Image (cartoon, grey):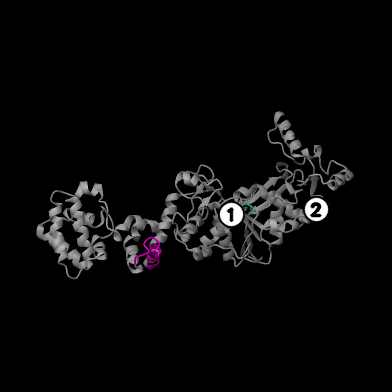
Amino acid sequence: MSKEVRVRFAPSPTGPLHIGGVRTALYNYLFAKKHNGTFLIRIEDTDQTRFVPGAQEYIMESLRWAGIMPTEGPGLGGEYGPYVQSERQEMYKPYADLLIQNGHAYYAFDSSDELSSMRDNAKNAGMPNWQYNSITRSSMVNSLTLSSEEVQRRLDAGEPYVIRMKMPRNQDVRFEDLIRGWVVVNTNNLDDKVLFKSDGMPTYHLANIVDDHLMNISHVIRGEEWLPSAPLHILLYQAFEWEAPEFAHLPLLLRPDGNGKLSKRDGDRLGFPVFPLNWTTSEGELYSGYREAGYLPEAFINMLAFLGWNPGTPQELFNLDELTKAFSLERVSKSGAKFDADKTRWFQQQYLKALDNKTLGHELLAYYPTESEERLTKVAELMKERAVFVGDIVTEGDYLINKPTEYDEQTISKKWKDESPAIMKEWLNILSDIDDFTTVNVETAFKTYLENKGLGFGAAMPQFRLLLTGKGMGPGIFEIATFLGKTECISRMNAGLEVLK
Ligand code: GLU
């Protein structure tokens, strides 16, 4: 790539960041890293009516948690700041003026009442999609229909206005999207978008183009929902006589059944998070996040990378460095990516399994603050294979730390026979006599006992497990026994025999 790569993630702080947004940030991050470029974040808050307090902090925190922090942005430094559009407000007006001067934009004074009555009239006449465009503008109140004196008078009098793009008539706009190939749109299908409002604020379109230019952005990598805006953006670059960046529009994230876009409500409805972190709305409604659900950031990122991209090989587990090496926009698909909740859990399980026991043991300290890290490391080792989340180790394997308080009903009805108490009492006596209480010794003693009695495993093993753990299943029972230690085993067996008789 000849040009210096500079890419940006440009979220609007209108609420929590959806995982689709995190994926956009991730692909930008990977693309920048891969090409030794720069990944920056710009906050697009020109629409103050949609501003949500806390959203910007949430976005930054999400990227930090996911491990994909930009190197330029609010609070991060960089030479192209400020990186929040409302702090750049005074920069945009001269550009809007420039477009008016060179004939690519014009003032429009139509009030919102006038505009809605225009829409209503058109609707009644059988045209439901009235637009302010190259045809209709000639019958509206703007600097193309008013005399220049009248325009000046209105401006001087401080009458509200907007500045609109003067969309050329019947012109094909073409650009080559790095994912979709050639895109051609005729300007007759485009309207005269508002670029600037008399409240002094640019709209998204103008601010976005001006900033991408001033921030020297080489590639715009963003969601498919912005594809319809791209022709306008291309025309704006032409109007300013600036070189346009390359464009890459990422596929949508779809619901698991492929039926429509994954929306913010789908997650909690279908039982998985669609946000990176928990978010509580001002009405007190909670949207759950991956972090709080117990996902490891590495698993979350790996899963997200595969929603719309694949490496072209069977390998599925990629850490961030590996993703950086393998990533390319050529391998991003055009069609929407279906979210797969099972696959997401699978990624999490793989990453939990790959965590070393010491790290996991340390995590478990949060649940068992008075336990030694050494013991918790052993708990991790015993339970890891059966867990998806760290919390599962606690729910599934709490008996490793705390005595069972109840005994699994199903195992009792299937396995606890009339003769079970007598067998367990005999085995308890033998167990109490084992001097060197190692896994091998306990197992050998157990097997010898069964052989001598002519019993099968089924007559004693589940019963032994039930007494020690209260459960019907779990990791190797002899390992559990030695983890608990002889005294604890004896005490649990006695207690269990009291309850089960
Ligand atoms: N502010 C837009 C958004 O919220 C950015 C679109 C773009 O990347 O150009 O997604």
Residue 177 as seen in the image, left or right of residue 276: right
Could you classify mark 2 by the number of other residues whose Cα lies within 10 Å: few (under 14), some (14-19), or many (20 or more)?
some
Q: Any mark on residue 54, and which?
A: 1
> What x and y, as percent, mark residue 491?
21, 60
Q: Which residue is mark 2?
A: 97
User: Image quarter for residue 434?
Assistant: bottom left
Q: Nearer the viewer, residue 466 or 193?
A: 466
- The boundaries of the magenta stretch are 358-371
Disc 2 residue type (three-letter):
Asp
**Residue 359: image x %, image y %?**
40, 66
The quarter of the picture where the N terminus appears is: bottom right
Q: Decide: is 366 above or below 166.
A: below
Residue 13 left/right relative to 348: right
| Residue at horizontal 82 percent and vertical 46 percent from the top | 158
In the rendered image of this protein, does residue 255 appear above or below residue 293? above
**Residue 362 forms part of the magenta stretch:** yes
Is residue 426 shown in magenta?
Answer: no
In the structure shown, which secondary structural element does the residue marked by tag 1 occupy?
loop
Looking at the image, residue 399 sits to the left or right of residue 241; the answer is: left
What separation in Å lies between label 2 and label 1 (alpha carbons)?
Answer: 34 Å
Q: Position of residue 65 (x, y in %)?
A: 51, 61
Q: Which mark is nearer the camera, 2 or 1?
A: 1
> Where on the picture, by quarter, is residue 363?
bottom left
Q: Is residue 384 visible?
A: yes
